Image (tube, grey):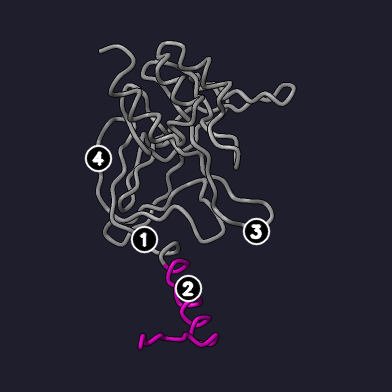
Amino acid sequence: MINTVKIKWPSYFGLLLFFLTTTTNAQNEYEPGYIILNNNDTIYGKIKDRTDDKLYHKIRFRKNKKTSRYSAYDIKAYKKGINSFESFWYKEETEFLKFDYSNHDGYGEKIFLKVMVKGKLSCYAKEYIQDDNFYVDYFELFKRYGENTFERATQGFFGLKKKRLTRYFFDCPNLVKKINNNSIKNPLDVVAYYNQFCGEK
């Protein structure tokens, strides 16, 4: 006879509430990390860059009980826990439902992008707060080394932006084939393939 364990609703609800509370508290705490100043100096301390429903325009950096605030204009990058972020000039433009993302010096505003992968082709996450539920969401942006544009990787629930990526990866036809026949379905796999098989050696 096989014994089964039944979880009563109150216990399940309590476990879920504990998980959500723990996650929320983690969002509100300072984490070990460092900042990289515009002069390339690295300073270690503790960092807080968000609450459970808000992304800070200026991160909080704490060292020796002193707290300072830094925007993307003030520093080049920072690392908080296991996550790294870099400062970029960023401009999002829309024309007839077509979105373009620029990275020209002095154009748009400076923001922090979360680093997902770096290489010949890098992938960054543009984080934002969902308007309806105050949830932190993101979308992936590709950037080739030395170029001053980003290319959005996905179109929400529909997966990779195949038409845009077909043009973007003109230099790697085998990657385009894999994207279009669904052999590669997510942004990080795109980056891994490109960095191994495509681009200049």
Give the extent of the magenta segment.
1-25
Question: Residue visible at 40% across and 29% down?
Answer: 190
Instruction: Describe residue 67's horizontal placement relative to residue 165 as left or right.
Output: left
Asked which secondary structure carries label 2, the reply is helix
Which residue occupies the foreground of this view, 79 or 194?
194
Q: Residue furthest right?
A: 96
Q: Which amino acid does label 2 sit on?
A: Thr
Judging by the rendered image, the residue that carries numbered circle 1 is: 30
Q: Is residue 73 visible?
A: no
Judging by the rendered image, the residue that carries numbered circle 3 is: 133
Q: Which one is in front in this view, the residue at disc 2 or the one at disc 1?
A: 2
Judging by the rendered image, the residue that carries numbered circle 2 is: 21
At label 1, counting other C-alpha atoms closer than 10 Å, the crowd grade (few under 14, some 14-19, many 20 or more) is: some
- The CA span between labels 2 and 4 is 33 Å
Question: Residue visible at 36% across and 60% down?
Answer: 30
Which residue occupies the foreground of this view, 14 or 111?
14
Tell me whether circle 3 and circle 1 mark residues in contact (CB < 8 Å). Answer: no
Asked which secondary structure carries label 3, the reply is loop
Q: Which amino acid does label 1 sit on?
A: Tyr
- Disc with the residue nearer the chain's start (4 vs 3): 4
At label 3, counting other C-alpha atoms closer than 10 Å, the crowd grade (few under 14, some 14-19, many 20 or more) is: few
Give the percent coordinates (x, y) of residue 90. Answer: 53, 28
- The CA span between labels 3 and 2 is 17 Å
Tell me whether circle 3 and circle 2 mark residues in contact (CB < 8 Å). Answer: no
Asked which secondary structure carries label 1, the reply is loop
Instruction: Tell me if residue 21 is in the magenta stretch.
Output: yes
At label 2, counting other C-alpha atoms closer than 10 Å, the crowd grade (few under 14, some 14-19, many 20 or more) is: few
Q: Which one is in front in this view, the residue at disc 3 or the one at disc 1?
A: 3
- The CA span between labels 4 and 3 is 36 Å
Mark number, residue 42: 4
